[in-house]
Amino acid sequence: MSSAPRSEESVFNQPIAGQLAGVGPRVAEKLAARGLLTLQDLWLHLPLRYEDRTRLTPIRDLRPGVPAQVEGRVEAVERGFRYRPVLRVAIGDASQATLVLRFFHFRAAQVAQFAPGALIRCYGTPKPGQNGLEIVHPSYRVLGDADAGSLGDELDPVYPTVEGIGPASMRKLIGQALDRLPGDAALELLPTEMLRGLHLPSLRQALLGMHRPARDADLAALATGTHPAQRRLALEELLAHNLSLRRQRIALQRHRAPVLAGKGKLAARLQSALPFSLTGAQQRVFAQIRTDLAQPSPMMRLVQGDVGSGKTVVAALAAMLAVEAGKQAALAAPTELLAEQHLANLRQWLEPLGIRVAWLAGKVTGKARGEVLAEIASGAAQVVVGTHALMQEAVVFHDLALAIIDEQHRFGVHQRLALRDKGASGQSVPHQLIMTATPIPRTLAMAAYADLDVSAIDELPPGRTPVQTIALSGERRPELVERIRAACAEGRQAYWVCTLIDDSDDVVAQAAQGTFESLSAQLPELRIGLVHGRMASAVKQSTMRTFKAGEIDLLVATTVIEVGVDVPNASLMIVENAERLGLAQLHQLRGRVGRGAAASNCVLLYQPPLSQMARQRLATMRETSDGFVIAEKDLELRGPGELLGTRQTGLAAFRVADLARDAGLLPQVRELADRLLADSPDIADRIIARWVGGAARYASA
């Protein structure tokens, strides 16, 4: 397998400043603000679109809305100041037709350029005007007679804007950088036989093909990201990120972890004491976890499953394997409410087995906090449940063998590392079990969690009644008010979810505060509560507890209840302005009802007219309650960053790749990664350095 010499590799990381003509300290600063620091950064600063200036269109053949390049002589010039300054220039060509160029921002020197008879070549998008077609603010240049008819043979790239640097200057800078692109032998890192099998161009060909496409290039393929040049770059970028995550996994695997390979008596006792039977999916996932925990290297497993699929029971069974070995398990949840729910379940299941379950959250203070910390430090607390408080410096575990993190994407990466480090001793670290109720599409999991083993609890417990979902126009609110009155009269409870807290003139949405007041006036016989994100945490928690206790009939809330408590008696969910929410969020909200035996309903209240995407979302919600199907659709509609919460997960933003679009490349990426890690680890490291560099994520957290 050939590889580039180290000296050639350094070309990638040469700083732009001082290397390219026209880049002084001020320009370098502007480029750096956009993340453009090296020659490689400019090579990978790919065009947003292309303009075809390789051909001329007769003015007679112009079509409204279709960009084109024309060449003609100035026939008339008119300056006007009626409402604001305007310059109108009429040009004509051999097709005996006239086109008007209109400028609202212009200088006197520009006006002087447009002398009658001057030859002008311009590019833009025609639209109907007062006197035929016109182009507003075209890009143009004045030609000498010798230049007439001479055209380039490449499409012109249009780059993402960099503040303070004009489009022409940006093209010039990137052109200079491309002139310094090394040859194929120096640039290429992937094995020749692999590339041949993929039917993709070399890296050099791909970069030149993206920046300087020939006039006959497939513009449709370039626009949709399916051009071979784009796929080649996406493949290597996905490969670099996959290798980076797996490298970090390999580094973590070098650590030791406690071997939890007991007979499983405690887990068996817990299972037989449960008032329900495990589903096949729960049994399968627990078996996978048990195999992991019996190894001397740390488990890194993500368990995903819909709301109500029974992830907590599986986590409790895993904790029993740690307790049986004389060690501790910790479960961290992102909110006190969710942590309290886990605490209630675990105490109900585990305390009859003689297991001490401790509780640590921000509100545990003073003497009580001191006692809990002492129990954790001595090992008397065998299972510890809490919030971010578990990660604080004062918390010292006696022997933490298993760290369980619920709704992991809601924690910062450093917080997850902090909990793992609580169990670190020498070269040993605790096993990690990560849970999420936001199903992640398989393609996304392959790319975003290449450092994790992924399990899915894809089966709901028997007896769960599917939630009926309907979409209604906002005009039918009065019907819903009556529906709530009837449901609460039968002893049921309901949610009314709003997408804003205060009334806003900018967004057509009913705010939670206003909705609470209007519903209180319309339903005076009901006990109505209000929860939103700007409330003090203690007030919010208190209201939710009151609702759970059945002392509130109707809870008006913002999406803060998306991950919330289990209220089996709540059977009606109304989501206001449902068209403004993503599929994953709508699915999470719907999961708040249908948790008891009663038939439950979710009403998606929308404001017409609906966009195409909103229509697709609402249709998907009506058609399926399968979180995995919904996650795939959400990925298709919204892309991976929004779906995962990129900022919190630490998933790197891709420059070229798009996980939804390029999912088909992932099997090849995994195969390439396997081969490189096995046969050429030095090449793997250089691919990571080239694409990820110092931005490697804390993927082992």
Image (cartoon, grey):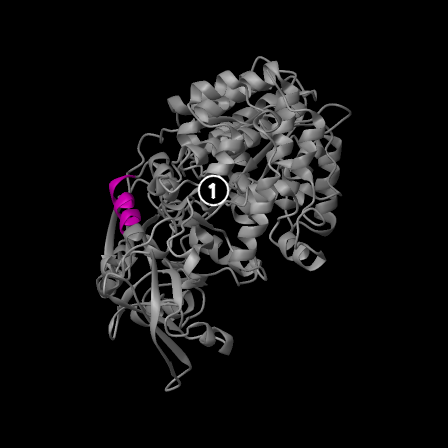
Magenta-colored segment: predominant secondary structure: helix
Going by the picture, which residue comes out furthest to the front?
146
Residue at the location (67% across, 33% down)? 420
Residue drawn at 66 percent across, 21 percent down: 682
Report the side of 507 relative to 409 (left or right).
left
**197 or 381: which is nearer to us?**
197
Magenta segment boundaries in residue numbering: 615-624
| Amino acid type of the residue that numbered disc 1 sits on in the rendered structure | Arg
Residue 616 within the magenta-colored segment of the rendering: yes
With 536 as the anchor, is 507 left or right in this view? left
Furthest-bottom residue in this view: 82
Quadrant assignment, res 141:
bottom left
Q: Is residue 39 above or below residue 324?
A: below
> x and y percent of residue 695 in the render?
64, 39
Say which element carries label 1. loop
Instruction: Locate the N terminus and report the quarter of the image it occupies.
Output: top right
Q: Is residue 83 above or below residue 38?
A: below
Decide if residue 274 is in sight here: no
Q: Position of residue 533 (x, y in %)?
A: 51, 59
Q: Give percent across and percent down for residue 358.
A: 64, 38
- Where residue 38 sits, quadrant-wise, is top right
Q: Is residue 484 visible?
A: yes
Q: What residue is at 66 percent from the left and 27 percent from the top?
A: 430
Tell me if 583 is positioned left or right of 209 in this view.
left
Is 316 part of what is drawn in magenta?
Answer: no
Q: In this picture, is 240 found above or below 142?
A: above
Q: Residues within 10 Å of mark 1 (few under 14, many from 20)?
A: some
In the rendered picture of this protein, how many numbered marks are placed on residues? 1
- Of 273 and 610, the residue lying toward us: 610
The residue carrying mark 1 is 212
- The residue lying at 65 percent from left, 32 percent from top is 689
